[in-house]
Every structure is written in C-alpha cells, then in structure tokens.
Amino acid sequence: MFYKIIIKSTLFFFILLLNLNANEIKSLKLEEIADGIYVHIGKHENFYEEENIGDIANIGFIIGDDSIAVIDTGGSHQIGEALRLAIKKISKKPIKYVINTHGHQDHIFGNTAFVSEGATIYGHYNLKKFLKERGSQYVRQITEAGDKVKGTSIIFPHKIIATTSSDETKKISDEITIDLGNRKLLLTSHPTSHTYADATVYDFKTKTFFVGDLVQDERTPTMDGLTKEWIKLLSKIDKVDYKIMVPGHGNIQTDNSALKKTQKYLQVLYDDVIDALKKDISAEKVIEIAAESEKNNWILFDRVNPGNVVRTFMRYEWEY
C-alpha cells in the first residue's frame, strides 16, 4: 500500500511538472535581417482562433550601443513576453523604447510584457484616440480568448511621434528621431491610410525600414482607413532609400515587390468599388465582385476582402 501511494504521488508530481512546462512561455524564433536588427515572422492564421494566441504579425527590435528599441509587440501578453525573453537571450542592454506602427491588436497587445522594463512607448499622434475608440471591442476579444491570453490589456502610448511646440499645443512636424547609442531611428506619423494612426521606423545605419501593415506580403491587407490615400502613401514610401523592408505580415523584402503587390490590390479594390458606385450596383453585389481578380494572389482573401469592400464602399459612396 505504501509503495502504491509513493508511485501515485510521483506520477502526480510528474504530470504537474509536464503541465507547468507546457504553460511555460518560450522565447520567440528570430531572424537577424541586418546588423543588430532581429525580426520574428508572424503566422498566416486567424487572430486568436484555435491555438493561436496572437502570433500573426511581424515584430522585431533594433540594438544600439546603449539601448534597444522594439517595433511592435504581438497580439497578446504571451507573445510580447516571448519576444522579451528572446531579446534577453541576445542582449543585456536595456529595452528603452517600444514603437507601435499602428493600433491593431496583433501589433500592440504585447506591450504589457514591456511595462516591467520601464520602456517608453511611442505611437502615432492619433494612436491613443484610436485605442480609446476600439477599447470595448478589444477588451471583449481579450475576455473571449480567456486564459490563453491572460494578462493582456491595452497600454496607451507614453509619447507621440510628432514634433510639437514647447506647450505641446501645436504640431510642427510628423517626424522625430531617437538615438539608441550610435544608432538613430527616424519615426514618422503618416496621414490616414491603412488606419488613421500609421507610423513607420527607419534605421539610418542599415537603411532598414519597418512599415507595419502599410505593406503586406502574402496575407490580404486589411483596409481600415482610406483606400485612395493609402495608395498615394505607398507611392511616397517607394521613394524612400531603403535596403531592407519589414512588412507588417509576410516575408522580409529587399525590393519593392510587396509594396507594388499591396498597391495593386488596393488599386483594384478601389477601382472596382468606384466603378460599381458609378453604375449604381448594390453593396451586396459589390461584395461579391470587387477585387475578385486578386483572389489567387493572397492568403485569407475570402475572410478579409469582403470587409475591405464594405469599408471602401461606405467611405466613397458619398462622392458618386
């Protein structure tokens, strides 16, 4: 009887250890894409569905002589923590900055993992407003996801990406520069395009350009702003002197292929919707036909494109 108790106790302890290990957060897999710049490539899966805990966006960090800047933090506290652990394995320098390229959940929900680091969070000058407007929706998503994203919450930016007057009442420029120690980064807030709170990060040292969801590869872009203005902004971005581009989703780029692919999809989407508006075609029918010629070029097209059509239709119907 005594031995049976010992065996059962040992077995219980072993199972407990297995469960603890299973719940342990492991550091993310990273790729060094340039000197001191590391990126984790997100999965092409649906947000929070099945086993996914928000690992769908490209996130990364840049190491300077004195400090580290994180660019986007993933879609949950767990992904943010996995990124933080990965950073600690590579460098012991302080994580001084977190920069959010926009306000979508898959890019900002990992911010909570960097609170303990005392990092200053930067975002577009409209990002706080964006997050306040989405607050109830985001909290509901976190709640519905349950324990697998426990600890996830909305963290507002501490500082805006803009140069202002001394009393902070007037915006002078949409750009600021931060220095990580012999490594300067240009942070830029952009006009409404993918969202109304998009920002980019440019590393002068390696000419690496983090563009968030303004450019995407493989995964269908989500239109949450103004399609026509997004197309215009991509033409400006294409003129930037970059060697490496980090899109919000998909493969790292060394040319403008993903940019042109994103721009083409948006142009087809816009043209098809405007054509339908001119012909007075119903919204229900437009959803079925707009941008369908692009379907085979993108992942998750059937899930994402209908929403893009509806939002584009609603935002331009008053013009026709």
Image (cartoon, rainbow, N blue to C red):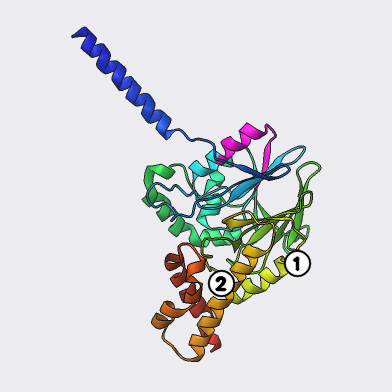
First of labels 2, 1 by sequence position: 1
Query: In this orientation, does residue 177 appear?
Result: yes
- Across and down, in percent, residue 100 comes to 61, 53
Secondary element at tag 1: loop
- Across and down, in percent, residue 266 comes to 57, 73
Q: Residue at x 59, y 67 (%)?
A: 262
Tag 2 residue: 265
Q: Is residue 306 above or below residue 180?
A: below
Residue 92 - label: none
Badge 2 density bin: few <14, some 14–19, many ≥20, Cα 10 Å: many
Q: What's the residue type where badge 1 is placed?
A: Lys
Q: Residue at x 55, y 77 (%)?
A: 268
Tag 1 residue: 239
Outermost residue toward the right? 182
Q: Which residues are magenta?
A: 83-98
Query: In this orientation, does residue 193 appear?
Result: no
Name the image quarter holding residue 147: top left
- Mark 2 → mark 1, Cα distance in angstroms: 19 Å
